[in-house]
Amino acid sequence: MIGTLFHQEILKRLSVLSPVYIVGGAVRDAQLGIPSKDVDAVIALPIQEIDRQLSEWGYMPHVIGAHQQTVSLFLGTERVDIVTFNGEVEKDALRRDFTLNAIYQEVGTGEIKDPLGGLKDLHNRQLKACGHAKERFYEDPIRILRLIRLAVRYNFEIERETWLAAIEQILLLRTVSAERITEELGRILILDEVDKALGLLDDLGYFETYIPELARLKGLVQNRYHTKDAWEHTRHVVKNTPSHVLLRLAALFHDMGKWETASRECYAWGTIYPSPQGYKIDDFKLIGQNLERWATKDVEVHGGRLDNYPETIVAKRIKLARPTPNNHFEWVPEGKRHFLQHEKESARLVRELLPRFRWAMVLPGGSRGERELHFLVGHHMLGTLTFMNELRGEVEQAKISDKARLFAWKIGWDGQYFNTQRVENLLVLWKADFLGGKQDAEKNVERFDRVQGKIRNACALLTEKANQLDWRYFTEFVRNKGLEGERYGRFKEQVRKRVMMSVKYSLTNTQFLEQEYAFFLNNKR
């Protein structure tokens, strides 16, 4: 009989009252030789009677569900769900999603009933809707996403009519709760063949309809260092990450900002001046850092003019210069393709995207997991930007230990404790991105791995040192200086970073603490 001893005990006792049929995934998986921890069953008894009887036998049933009530029982990770039906297997089968989930096994006799030919479809590895596909998807549109998950997980082909009905009814997913959508997408994202799943979701029109920020990456040409467009690169990066929903989501969203920031290299000359929309040069809106220092000055701006917002230039470098005669703008001949600050734009888009779903349900740490997702996306370029020279072989590997330690601290210290897992997550995402279709990735992977090895070694040292810090002498020192409240906290963080970055400094060294205190006062920290 299908199921564990827990499942079998409950269902056999119920079968004395009325025939019980196991149906759905447990029967399907049994035919494929796969054990199941969850079992669905039907019985021709009212829900109230099932609940009452199980309670009398000493079980603890839970009646759940608003539209179709279900009696559920749990034992650890094992679960059995029981619903009522009219006793006619043929009619019950027509309300189910796919034929291979409409195979029934009677508990009392072990007899298999297959009213819709699910066994044949299972043998042929074909996913086919029960009855009319449009009706099945209309009854419960979440079946459209379940179709993708089952097809990829079990390597099934989708029957043509079922596939066309799913495409036609993709808009019905708007009527499904964000919780159910998120749960199904979360299960899809951790599939082994996630790249295939992303391809099917794209073919289905899911991204174009519900996450257009991803769909517009298709065909977006990248710079000369990449061999794939932005969408194919994204799929490759997701495929490169382990089966962990946080990392898969971060990989999926990491380059969403590239459409917004895609630009071509240019020069602009003129006077930078403030406006209600921000800083401008000539008729161009200017985006960049520290623009206020150049206000009212004649400058030359080297940057990128945005493809999709051609009135905007993202500054890469600015220097004092007189405008060239009769010319305030010029394309750089054979200029580079730029996506300047795309990681920041990706992080902004993630923040906009989060309310459409309920990722806190499936991410470790709930809402904290959403913050980690935002952090990873917003910092995914930091490793490349920090160690660019080392990755090019322009710096000796032996000289990067201090740099690796500072990098690890910047990523891992969250204000309360050193989070090694956050650093590891960023390293994994960074490597997946590095190997996601860049021209020289394979040639430079050994150098890349050495850099990441230095960072991991730094993490181990920082973790050990953080656990050994004794703040008693420091506390007494600060008390004598009269520091308290916010100023105490800022001074403590200043000293902590210095101590963590070098073995030369100690929390019990009065001279060191005095020097840091003087620096703290002089900088009005």
Image (spheres, rainbow, N blue to C red):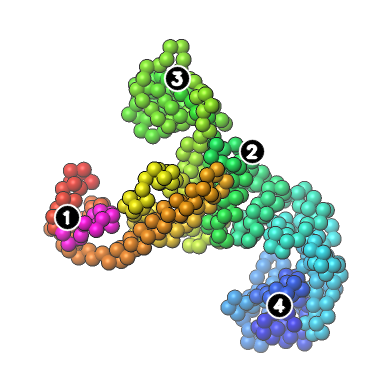
Q: Amino acid type of disc 2? A: Gly
Can you identify the residue that label 2 sits on?
Answer: 219
Residue 288 in percent (x, y) is at 42, 33
Quarter assignment of residue 49: bottom right
Q: Residue at x 80, y 67 (%)?
A: 122
Q: CA distance from mark 1 to mark 3?
A: 51 Å
Vertical order, 169 against 465 (above or below): above
Q: Secondary structure at mark 4?
A: helix
Q: Is residue 127 left or right of residue 294?
A: right
The verdict on residue 240 being magenta is no
Q: Which mark is residue 48?
A: 4
Q: CA distance from mark 2 to mark 1?
A: 57 Å
Density class for disc 3 (Cα within 10 Å; few <14, some 14-19, many ≥20) is some
Q: Marks 1 and 4: which is nearer the front?
A: 1
Q: Marks 2 and 1: which is nearer the front?
A: 2
Q: Secondary structure at mark 1?
A: helix
Density class for disc 1 (Cα within 10 Å; few <14, some 14-19, many ≥20) is some
Vertical order, 249 against 77 (above or below): above
Q: Secondary structure at mark 3?
A: loop
Q: Amino acid type of disc 1? A: Leu
Can you identify the residue that label 1 sits on?
Answer: 513
Q: Marks 3 and 2: which is nearer the front?
A: 2
Q: Marks 4 and 2: which is nearer the front?
A: 2
Region rendered in magenta: 495-509
Can you identify the residue that label 3 sits on?
Answer: 282
Residue 153 in percent (x, y) is at 69, 62
Earlier sequence position, callout 1 versus callout 4: 4
Vertical order, 269 against 190 (above or below): above
In the rendered image, which quarter contains the N terminus? bottom right
Q: CA distance from mark 4 to mark 2?
A: 56 Å
Q: CA distance from mark 3 to mark 4?
A: 75 Å
